Image (cartoon, rainbow, N blue to C red):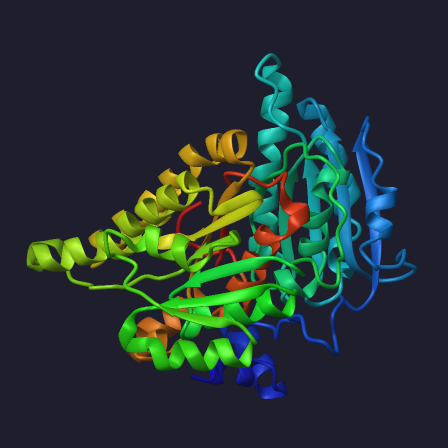
Amino acid sequence: MADRYLRFAGTAPGRFLTRRLGLPRPAPLHRWSPGRPALTGGLLALTTGKSDLDLSPVLARTGLPESDGAPAAVVLDATGVRDVEALAEVHAALHPVVRSVESSGRIVVLGAPLDPTDHHQAAAQQALEGFVRSLGKEIGRGRTVNLIRLTDAMAAESTLRFLLSPKSAYVSGQVIGVGADADVAVDWDLPLAGRTALVTGGARGIGAAVAETLARDGARVVVLDVPRAEEDARRVAERLHGRALALDITAPDAGARIADALPDGLDVLVHNAGITRDRRLVNMPAERWSSVLDVNLASVLRTTDALLDAGTLRRGGRIVATASIAGLAGNAGQTNYGASKAGVVGLVRSLAPRALAEHGVTVNAVAPGFIETTMTAAIPLFIREAGRRMNSLAQGGLPADVAETTAWLAHPASGAVNGQIVRVCGQSLLGA
């Protein structure tokens, strides 16, 4: 369903009224398209404190030229900030330039991991999180602000490329940890060429968008959905030159059947299948509880375990699960859904280090907020409008926003990103 308020707010009368009445003022977002694959404008690189990072080679490969005017993107290296006094340099660096950043622009702050032996450094670096999240809520005009914690600039290249591109249009206020990783030879135009990706719940909505984006990046896509959606799954698969797999993901032998269907192995596993059965707990029958937990969480655990144990997921593989802001902040009428999606977060945080050490596979999750789908289009008007406006970008996201974030986590060069929960919510005002 079209966001008529967004369209109206962009007109002259709309700008006047929203400003005078203090209403949300959403700006159209620059999302990736073949015709506009990069931000429009240059890159301004700044440094505070004493940094050991050499960002020049990585930033040069983002494709953004050095800014000679209003920047489209600002990268602030604050990894050298070690005390409260040095935080003044963060203010001094960004205060003069924030207003000049182009619409749909990006600010990326680079921080260091918290030092458990130095509480002054840990306090100063933790302060960057509050700074980034607060700036993201006030900067407006479709601009985003994110923080990367890193020790190696080269290992963060895929993350920097993502956050400094239109692909991250609906990702803001996020803190992303990037570890160390061996160099990987990557075709940045077709990074998933020669790789096989399976998307559960891929017949429609967000799942179909994920399948399409992974195919765009070169993957051979397997679209998995329940048998009653087989026709839709086949249409998506045929359009993407992939294949469909009709399977109930909650079946006890679902993992074994996927392994049998993919004898040559799997490189990317996207757990997207999910259902809602909303009702307040006092009115919720046991079946509504158990069906949501089975689809959204238990099936994810069973199939992940089965595919790892069978060796179906090859070394260098990626698991991307779908959480939700409902699992992070809670939502009335969704105790079952919130529990299932919080469980996905627990799965990711526990499994990620072991899966990488034992199988060479990373495990991450996307946590969508209000995304414009047929499901949200059916929500009553006032609730739908609240969902759209209650984020820093004052609008709903699109399935493509979740798909682009999934594709970044699935990227061969994203091996240093592990155990992360990345919200695709326009920096929702709910939760952290």
In this picture, residue 191 sits left or right of residue 369: right
Q: Is residue 401 above or below residue 344?
A: below
Q: Left or right: 58 with respect to 324?
A: right
Image coordinates for residue 313, horizontal then vertical, percent: 49, 46
**Could you say which quadrant of the image residue 261 lies in?**
bottom left
What residue is at 79 percent from the left and 34 percent from the top? 48
Which residue shows up at 45% across the image and 62% down it? Answer: 199
Q: Nearer the viewer, residue 329 or 35?
A: 35
Q: Position of residue 144 (x, y in %)?
A: 63, 57
Which quadrant of the figure contains the C terminus? top left
Q: Nearer the viewer, residue 368 or 331?
A: 368
Quarter that holds the N terminus: bottom left
Is residue 342 in view from this perspective? Answer: no
Residue 38 percent across, percent down from the top left: 76, 67
Q: Position of residue 385 (x, y in %)?
A: 38, 74
- Residue 101 visible, this orientation: yes
